[in-house]
Image (tube, coloured by chain):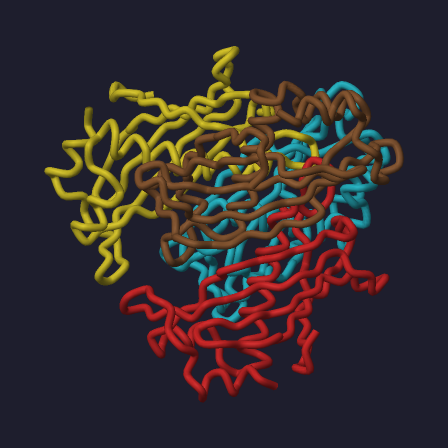
Chain colours: A brown, B yellow, C cyan, D red
C-alpha cells in the first residue's frame, strides 16, 4: 500500500460471470478491475480514459498479479478498490482489492502495471507531468 | 406486449462488454437479459432462481429472438425491461427491451422462451400452478 | 434452408464458455456464430471482414433468432454451419446450425440478419453487386 | 523455467475476444490458459480435470502473474505453452507462455499457482503422491 487515496467502485455480479462451480470465474476479476479503473479515472481522478484518448494516448496493461482468497457468488456485492502505488516514466503501478460488501473480507487482491502509449505509434510514452499530478491524490 | 407488469433492471456497461467498434458486443445483451431476469425474479416476482433450484427445478432458454436497433456505448446506462407475455405447459414467453436511460430510446428488443426443467432428469416439466401465479402479475 | 452452399467451422469449446450447469452458456453461441462467419467469409467466400473494412464497409447484426435444442458440454466438438438464405438492399439473411460432431445432432439452430453499413456515416448501405455475388455461391 | 516438459495447445482467436483496440482483451489470456490446462491435463498428463472431480478433488487458481509483451490480433494463431514449475503440499506452480505461431514471439508469459481442494469441504488438500507423479514429467 502507498499513501495515495483508495477509491471504490461497486460491482454487480452477473450470472454470466459464474463458472461451473457457481463462483465468479477467475478471469472476470480483470474485467471488474478495468471497470473500476474506468469509473474511478473519470469520477475520482477527473481524467477519464476518453480524455487520454483525446490527448492522443491510451493505457495498456503490462503486468497483473492477482491473489485469489475467497470465492464470490451470485448474491455477493463486490467493492473494487484501487490505489495508485507509484509511477515511473511511462508506467503506473496500481494496487487493487476486491472486497465482499457484506463481510468486508477480501475476495482477491493484487497489483497491476499500466503503460501509457502513444496512439500515433503504439509505443510507450512518458506520462506528462500535468496528467500524472491528477493521479497523485 | 401483454397486460402483465413490466419490470426494470439497470445495467452498468463494462469496458469488457465492448467490441472492436466500441459498441456493446451483440452477445452481451443475452448476458444482460439473464442478469435482469435473475434480479427481477428475486426482487419483483419474489420467487428467485435459487428458489426454483431448491424446489428441484431450473429454467433453460429455448428460444431467443432479438432485434438490434441502436448501438450502446461505454457511457450509456441501459435499462433492461422484461415482461411475461404468456405461458403454456413447461414454457414461459418473456418480452424484453433494452432502453438507453438518457434518451429513452430502444437499443434492442425481442422475446425469449424459457422452459422449466426438472433437475432430477433434465426433462421439461409443467410449471406448477402456485409458481406460475407468482409470475402472472 | 436455401439452395446456397453450407460451410462449416469447427469450434473448440473453452472451459470459460460453460455456465453453472456445466453447459455452454446461451450467449456463447452468438460468439461461435461470429467466429464461424469471420472464418467462412475469409476461407469460403474469399471476401473477408477485413476486406469489407478496407472497402469502407462493416457488417452489423440486426436480428438473431436462435433455438436451443441440446446442451453442449466441455468434451463436445461443435460444428458451426452457416448458409446464405437471401439478401435485399443492405441486408443479408444467414441460416445457421450448431451440430455436435460426434452425434451429428443439432445443439442449436436459427437465422440472423446482418446489415451492411458505411464506415463513413454508420448508415445502412446497399450491398454492392460485385460483393454480393461472392456470397451467392 | 523448470526441467519438466513444456506442452502446447493451439488457441483459435475469436472475434469476441477482441477489445476496442482490436487486440485480444487482457482477461481472455486467463481463459486461454484454462483451456490449455484442461487440454494438456487430459491429453499430455493423462489425468483430466474430470478425473480429479471423480476422485473428489478440484483445482482452483490461487495466484496468477502475467506479463503482457505483444498484442494479439484476430489473424494471429496463439500457442499456449505450460510447464509444471514445482509443487508443495496442496499447491502446484505452473509456468506459461503465449506465443504467436507465425513469428514465435511471446505475446504474454507468467506463472500461476493452483490449489487442490476437496469437493467435500472446499478446503485445500495435499496432492496425493500418485497424482502428482503423473504431472512430474
Marks counted in the figure total 0
Q: In which quarter of the view is residue C125 placed?
A: top right
- B40 on left or right of B35: left
Q: Residue at x 38, y 68 (%)?
A: D124
Q: Nearer the viewer, residue C98 or D51?
A: D51
Quadrant of the image containing the N terminus of chain A: top right
Q: For residue B80, what is the image quadrant?
A: top left
**Residue D94 % position (x, y):** 60, 70
In the picture, measured across the screen, residue A107 lies left or right of residue B92, that is right
| Above or below for D135 versus A62 | below
| Residue C83 appears left or right of C19 | right
Q: Where is residue A10 in the image (x, y as percent from the top left)?
A: 44, 31
**Residue C112 in view (yes/no):** no
Which image quarter is the C terminus of chain A in?
A: top right
Q: Residue at x 32, y 33 (%)?
A: B39
Q: Which of B122 and C110 is in front in this view?
A: B122
Vertical order, D61 against A32 (above or below): below
Closer to us: D129 or B34: D129
Vertical comparison of A99 with B136: above or below: below
Instruction: State the image coordinates of residue C13 (x, y, percent, origin top left).
Output: 54, 61
Give the residue drawn at x 65%, y 56%: D66
Q: Which residue lies furthest to the right in this view?
A: A121
Left/right of residue A2 with respect to residue A13 in the rendered view: right
From the viewer's perspective, is residue D42 above or below residue C83?
below
Q: Nearer the viewer, residue B54 or A128?
A: A128
Q: Can the viewer see residue D113 in this picture?
A: yes
Q: Residue furthest front?
A: A3
Give the residue at x 31% y 21%.
B6
Where does the image place residue B72, in percent across and percent down from the top left? 58, 25
Q: Give the farthest residue toward the top.
A: B103
Amino acid at each position: 500500500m502507498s499513501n495515495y487515496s483508495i477509491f471504490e467502485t461497486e460491482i454487480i455480479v452477473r450470472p454470466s460471470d459464474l463458472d461451473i462451480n457457481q463462483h465468479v470465474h477467475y478471469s472476470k476479476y480483470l474485467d471488474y478491475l478495468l471497470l473500476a479503473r474506468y469509473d474511478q479515472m473519470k469520477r475520482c481522478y477527473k481524467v477519464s480514459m476518453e480524455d487520454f484518448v483525446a490527448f492522443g494516448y491510451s493505457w495498456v496493461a503490462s503486468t497483473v498479479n492477482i491473489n485469489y482468497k475467497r470465492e464470490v457468488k451470485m448474491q455477493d456485492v463486490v467493492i473494487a478498490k484501487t490505489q495508485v502505488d507509484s509511477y515511473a516514466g511511462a508506467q503506473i503501478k496500481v494496487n487493487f482489492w476486491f472486497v465482499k460488501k457484506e463481510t468486508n473480507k477480501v475476495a482477491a487482491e493484487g497489483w497491476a502495471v499500466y503503460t501509457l502509449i502513444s496512439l500515433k505509434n503504439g509505443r510507450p510514452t512518458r506520462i506528462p507531468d500535468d496528467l500524472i499530478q491528477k493521479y497523485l491524490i
